[in-house]
Image (cartoon, rainbow, N blue to C red):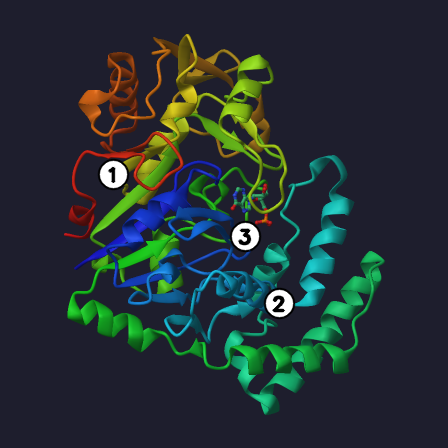
Amino acid sequence: MSVVAVIGGQWGDEGKGRVVDLLAQQSHMVIRYSGGNNAGHTVINDRGTFKLHLVPAGIFNSETVNIIGTGVVVDPAALLEEMETLAAAGVTFDNLFISDRAHVIMPYHLEQDRIQESQRGDGRIGTTGRGVGPAYSDKMERIGIRMGDLLHEETLLPRVRRALDVKNKLLELYGGQPQSLEPTYAKLREYGQALKARIATTHPLVQQAIGRGDRILLEGAQASLLDVDWGTYPYVTSSAPGAAGACQGAGIGPRQVSSVLGVFKAYSTRVGGGPFPTELLDETGTELRERGHEYGTTTGRPRRCGWFDAVAARYVVELNGIDHLAITKLDVLDTLPTLQICTGYQLGDQTINYMPSSDVELSQVKPIYEELPGWQTSTDDARSFDELPPNAQRYLLRLEELTGAPATLISVGPARDASIERVPTYSFFA
Ligand code: IMP
C-alpha cells in the first residue's frame, strides 16, 4: 500500500499546498478529496507561483493522474477559470479527472451563502462565500446536482427543475433573487460540454492504481479544527477534511492508507469567526501576520494569529491517527525573543487538557502557556535538523513531545527546497 493522506492540522492555511507539491513530485496519482474552491493552495515551482483552488497539486507533472474526488463540491465556473489560468502557464489537462459523483456548486448556493451569512449577524461564520456549505447541505438533503448530471440532458433538466422549485422558495423567503430554469440549465449544459472529457467514473482509476501499488497522495483542504463533526462547531466548514474524510471522499478504504501526514504551522492562524484560545491581539500577533504574510489566499482577509496550541494539536493527531507532523513556517518565528506553547486550558476554576465541544466554553478558556526561549537568528538556510539553532531544535522537540508525533518535515521558507526532511519523503509511501 502506498497511499499518503496529507491533512490540515489547525484551522487551514497551514501550508498544505507546499507539502502536497513536494510529495506530488513522487506520486503517480493525487486526489483532492473534500471541500471546494474555498481552499487556496499556494504552490511555488519553476513555472511560477500558483494559487490552486480545485485542481490537485499534481497537475504540474503530466505523468501524474489528478482526480477531483467524489467528496469535493465543484463550482464549474471557478474550475474552468482556474484551468484557463493554468493553461496560460502551459499546464495541460489530459491527466485531470473529475468524479462524476462530485456535487456541483450551483449559482443559488452562492446567493444562499451570502444571504445566510448576512442573517447570522454577530454569529457570522465568516465563510469564504463560495457556496460550499449550501452545496453540501443540498447533497445531504438529496437535491444536489452532480458533475455526472451535467453530461445527461434527459436527467439534468428534471433535476434542476426540482432543485429550483425548492431553492427559489427558500431564496424568496430569505429576500434573495429567485433563479430561472432555462438560463440555469443552459449554463450547466455549457459547463458539461466544456468539461465532458474530464468528468469520469473515477473509482476504477483509483482501484487500478492501488492494485498496481502506485503512490497515491490524498490532498486535504481546510483542516481538522474546521471539521463539521470534530471542529469548533458551528464555526466550521461543511465537510470532513480529516483522514476519515480522505477515505470517504477519495473512495479508498482506511486500511489502504499507509500514512497520515498532518500539516501544522509553527504557530496558529485562523480566518473567519469562532473561538481561538491562543489568539494574540497584540504586537506579536501583528508581527506574525506580517512576517508570515498571513492574508487569505482565497479571500485576501487578514488571518488571526496566535501561539501554537498543543492541546488542539494533540487532539488532531489522535483524531486522525497522524504518523508524521509537517511543521511549516518555522522561519516566521526567527525574530521572537521568547515563544509560548499552549499546554492546557483554564476553564473557570478547572484545568483541562482537551478541547471542549462547546464554542462558548472554548471561547472562555484561558490558555496555560509554557515559555521557551527564541533563537533570534535566521533559519532560512537550514537544510537539516542539526543546522537549526539549538533553541529551534528544542522548540520542535517539545512540539513532538506534546503532540505525540514526530516532526518529520520542517519548512523554513516558501521555496520548494527550503525544507528539512528528517526522513526521505518517499518513505511516507512505504
Ligand atoms: P466555508 O468553508 O466557506 O463555508 O467557510 C467556513 C469556515 O471555514 C470559515 O471560517 C472559513 O474562513 C473557513 N475556511 C474554509 N476554507 C478554508 C481554507 O481553505 N483555509 C482556511 N479557512 C477556511
Q: Secondary structure at mark 1?
A: strand
Q: Which mark is residue 77?
A: 2
In contact (CB < 8 Å): disc 2 and disc 3: no
* Quadrant of residue 141 within the rendered picture: bottom right
In the image, 229 versus 189, the foreground residue is 189
Name which residue type carries label 2.
Answer: Ala
Using the numbered discs, state the Cα–Cα distance from disc 1 to disc 2 in whole angstroms: 36 Å
In the image, 169 versus 126, the foreground residue is 126
> Residue at 76% across / 83% down in the picture?
182
Q: Position of residue 49 (x, y in %)?
A: 47, 47
Q: Earlier in the sequence, mark 2 or mark 3?
A: 2
Whether residue 396 is visible here, answered yes or no, is yes
Q: Which mark is residue 238?
A: 3
Mark 3, ligand 1, within 8 Å: the answer is yes
Residue for badge 1? 324
Q: Which mark is residue 263?
A: none
